[in-house]
Image (cartoon, rainbow, N blue to C red):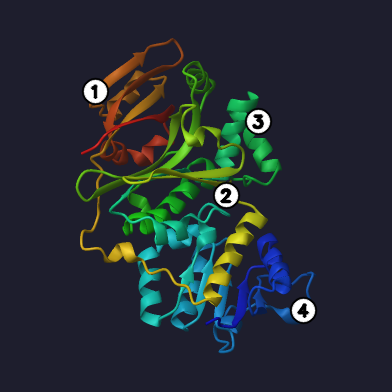
Amino acid sequence: MKQKLNIGLFGFGVVGQGLYEVLKTSPAFDSEISKICVKNKKSRSLPDQYFCYNPDDILDDPNINTVVELIDNADEAYHIVKKALKKGKHVVSANKKMLAENMAEMIQLQKENKVSLLYEASACGSIPVIRNLEEYYDNDLLLSVTGILNGSSNYILSKIFDHNQSYDSALKDAQDLGFAESDPTFDVEGFDALYKLIILTVHSFGSVIDPEDVLTYGISNISDFDIQYAREKRYKIKLVGQVERLEGNNITLFVLPRFVRKDKYIYSVEDEFNGVVIKGKAYDKQFMFGKGAGAHPTGSAVLSDITALAHNYAYEYKKMNYANDFNYSKEHQVELYLRYSDDSVLNKFNFQSITEEYKGQEYSYKIGFIKLADLLNIKNELRSLDIFMSITGKSLNY
């Protein structure tokens, strides 16, 4: 049976405004936005009586049964969502950082208070990957989820490899178009993709992983040398997030640049688009493709969650209830391309074997197998070193 949703909305930026307009005209279900909480008083497209400035005006209102949280600040979002759930309100959130850092608590709050928290908009924009993983891909058959999860970094890499732009030029274009912030760290260093991968891992294998424990390395150190090497090998470089099932009940996950051949699905994922490859024993590979960010793609995912709430939908987290829990393994070996200029940096990298190497006057590189655990031991140093790393796609499973 459908339920009427009386919505309190947090945030009235581009996505919030778009959501309001769609809800006002949608005949699909019975809902309305009663109050909108914003930070600052200023002239807006709606009358002043719609707006409030104290979160408790929504959270303490017994007539509001649903909260939609569309703000940027992860700490503020945490307090809003936590209190809403404790008050017995359903919640829709798009805040990937807040969710990834507090997933276990968010799942527990839903159970304790018999309410639903939906967050399709937090990962891959308009691509309905979370609900598909939750409902259709059993982890006895699921082998891996691999994807381009960040549209900003993918836009930059597309401009580099398809339009021969430099990294700095491509980054400026991304910023001018609104795909990247003035401080692009969150996107280009891989953190945005990391938080999305943490969320996808929960719905892929039922495992809640601390983001701090996952190897994450972005594209900001890419050089013309690395780009030329990839071109000579007929590769593109993509920033890829992956969670993979290993032998036994082990999984591993990471966010790293990757050399991608033309025969791979994600090779052709360009500009601000996202692409996710779901691989299983019985169904081989499934590919999902779409816009991963922006007002309309994100808004459509938010609307989808609101519609699902109106039909009493909730994530069941079925994979967390399986008898055989998955263990996060860091012993997995990946084949790594390491470009460097100073030989002394090699002392930090414990390669298990070397498959290719080159020594040049300005830059040199080694390609070989290395454990994720050894890279995690130096992860806080990686961004400050004069290096660039990319995996080749080959690995050794243990």
Q: Marks 2 and 3, how far apart in space?
A: 22 Å
SS for callout 2: loop
Q: Which residue is mark 3?
A: 169
Q: Which residue is mark 2?
A: 292
Is label 1 or label 2 in front?
Answer: 2
- The image quarter in which residue 152 lies: top right
Q: Marks 2 and 4, how far apart in space?
A: 33 Å
| Neighbourhood count class around disc 1 (C-alpha, 10 Å): few under 14, some 14–19, many 20 upward | few
Is label 2 or label 3 in front?
Answer: 2
Amino acid type, callout 3: Ser
Mark 2 or mark 3: whose residue is earlier in sequence:
3
Q: Residue at x 53, y 52 (%)?
A: 124
Amino acid type, callout 2: Gly
Q: Residue at x 77, y 79 (%)?
A: 48
274 left or right of 250 in image: right
Q: Is residue 274 above or below residue 36?
A: above
Amino acid type, callout 1: Ser
| On-image quarter of the C terminus | top left
**Coordinates of residue 226 in the picture (x, y in percent):** 48, 22
Q: Is residue 35 above or below residue 213?
A: below
Is label 2 or label 4 in front?
Answer: 2
Seen from the viewer's position, the closer of residues 218 and 133 is: 133
Q: Which residue is mark 1?
A: 353
Q: Residue at x 31, y 54 (%)?
A: 139
Query: Do callouts 4 and 3 mark residues in contact (Cβ within 8 Å)?
Result: no
Amino acid type, callout 4: Asp
Q: Marks 4 and 3, how far apart in space?
A: 42 Å
Q: Marks 1 and 4, how far apart in space?
A: 66 Å
319 left or right of 223 in image: left
Q: Is residue 296 above or below residue 258?
A: below
Q: Which residue is mark 4?
A: 48
